[in-house]
C-alpha cells in the first residue's frame, strides 16, 4: 500500500480494501471449486453410494 501512496491519483486505503475483497473472493471460489471437484470425483467412483436423508444400513 505504500507504493499506492507514492503514485499520483492512487489511494492506499482504496487499494487496501481492494486486496481484502480479492482475498475474500478467492477463498470463496476455491471452496466452491474443491466442492465441485469432490462431487465429480464421487460421481465417477464406481460403487459410490448416494447420501440420503434418514437412510439406514443393513447389518
Image (spheres, helix red, strand yellow):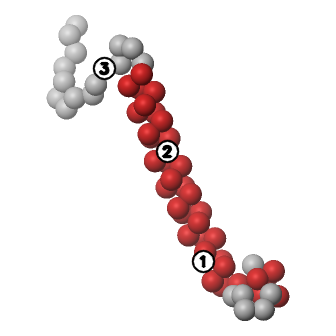
Residue at the spot of label 2:
33
**What percent of the width, then of the height, locates residue 10?**
72, 87
For marks 1 and 3, give the CA distance: 44 Å
Question: Residue placed at 49% from the left, 44% from the top?
Answer: 33
Question: Residue placed at 27% from the left, 28% from the top?
Answer: 51
Residue at the spot of label 3:
49
Question: Residue placed at 60% from the left, 70% from the top?
Answer: 20
Residue at the spot of label 1:
17
Snapshot quadrant of residue 5:
bottom right
User: Is disc 3 placed on a helix, strand or loop?
Assistant: loop
**What percent of the width, then of the height, locates residue 17?**
60, 77
Relative to 50, say whether 38 is above or below. below
Specify whether 3 is left or right of 49.
Answer: right
N-terminal of the two: label 3 or label 2? 2
User: Is disc 1 placed on a helix, strand or loop?
Assistant: helix
N-terminal of the two: label 2 or label 1? 1
Relative to 25, say whether 13 is above or below. below
For marks 3 and 2, give the CA distance: 22 Å
Question: Residue placed at 31% from the left, 20% from the top?
Answer: 49
Amino acid at each position: 500500500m505504500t507504493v499506492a501512496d507514492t503514485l499520483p491519483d492512487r489511494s492506499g486505503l482504496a487499494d487496501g480494501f481492494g486486496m481484502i475483497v480479492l482475498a475474500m473472493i478467492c477463498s470463496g471460489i476455491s471452496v466452491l471449486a474443491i466442492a465441485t471437484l469432490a462431487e465429480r470425483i464421487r460421481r465417477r467412483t464406481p460403487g459410490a453410494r448416494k447420501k440420503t436423508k434418514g437412510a439406514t444400513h443393513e447389518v
